[in-house]
Image (cartoon, helix red, strand yellow):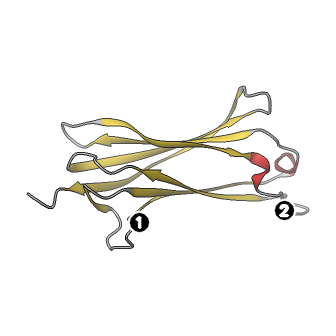
Amino acid sequence: VAAVQDPNGLLPVNIILQEDAWQVKVKWSVKGLVSGLMGGTWRISVHYESIGAGPEGQAGAANIPVNSVPAGGFPNFEREYEHTINVAAGLPAGAYRLVTLLNYRTPSGQAYEMAGFVEGPIFQVYDSQS
């Protein structure tokens, strides 16, 4: 799950004032016998794409150690993660679609065929002067 958050706590959270920094809260989990034995790193990257003409790019990224969350007990060994990506102010006014990617890297730093993504939500950045 990836959700846009207005750090000022204002509703609706997917309408962001251009001069405000904002956040994306990402939640994910893994479970099963292997999750209790995993090491390595999760790589989160948050990307935005303008709806219509406009910019696109990476809003932020983070590396999260797999073992930063302890594995639950038998039989699921579930790990539930939550991380907030802080996004700088200044995105031009307009409508955008958010895409959040999650990739796993082994303890040696190699990419592995374990990943996830979520598309959305749509959010709007507005200029208070126009």
Residue 126: image x %, image y %?
A: 20, 57
Q: Looking at the rendering, which quadrant does residue 22 occupy?
A: bottom left
Rendered view: 109 above or below 72: above
The one of 69 and 120 positioned closer to us in this rendering:
69
| Relative to 114, 106 lies left or right | right
Q: Which residue is mark 1?
A: 7
Disc nearest the viewer among 2 and 1: 1
State the mark number for residue 72.
2
Assess disc 1: are there few (<14), some (14-19) or many (≥20) residues with their C-alpha within 10 Å of its C-alpha: some
Q: Amino acid at mark 1?
A: Pro
State the mark number for residue 111.
none
Query: Is tag 2's residue or tag 1's residue first in the polypeptide sequence?
Result: 1
Assess disc 2: are there few (<14), some (14-19) or many (≥20) residues with their C-alpha within 10 Å of its C-alpha: some
| Relative to 22, 96 lies left or right | left
Q: Quadrant of the N terminus?
A: bottom right
Local SS, label 1: loop
The residue depicted at 32 percent of the width and 40 percent of the height is 49
The CA distance from mark 2 to mark 1 is 31 Å
Q: Quadrant of the C terminus?
A: bottom left
Q: Looking at the rendering, which quadrant does residue 69 occupy?
A: bottom right
Residue 65: image x %, image y %?
A: 73, 45
| Image label count | 2
| Relative to 52, 20 lies left or right | right
Residue 113: image x %, image y %?
A: 69, 31
The residue depicted at 31 percent of the width and 56 percent of the height is 123
Local SS, label 2: loop
Q: Looking at the rendering, which quadrant does residue 80 occupy?
A: bottom right
The residue depicted at 82 percent of the width and 49 percent of the height is 35
Q: Amino acid at mark 2?
A: Gly
Residue 45: image x %, image y %?
A: 52, 41
Q: In the rendered structure, are the residues bearing label 2 and label 1 in contact, judged by CB atoms less than 8 Å apart? A: no
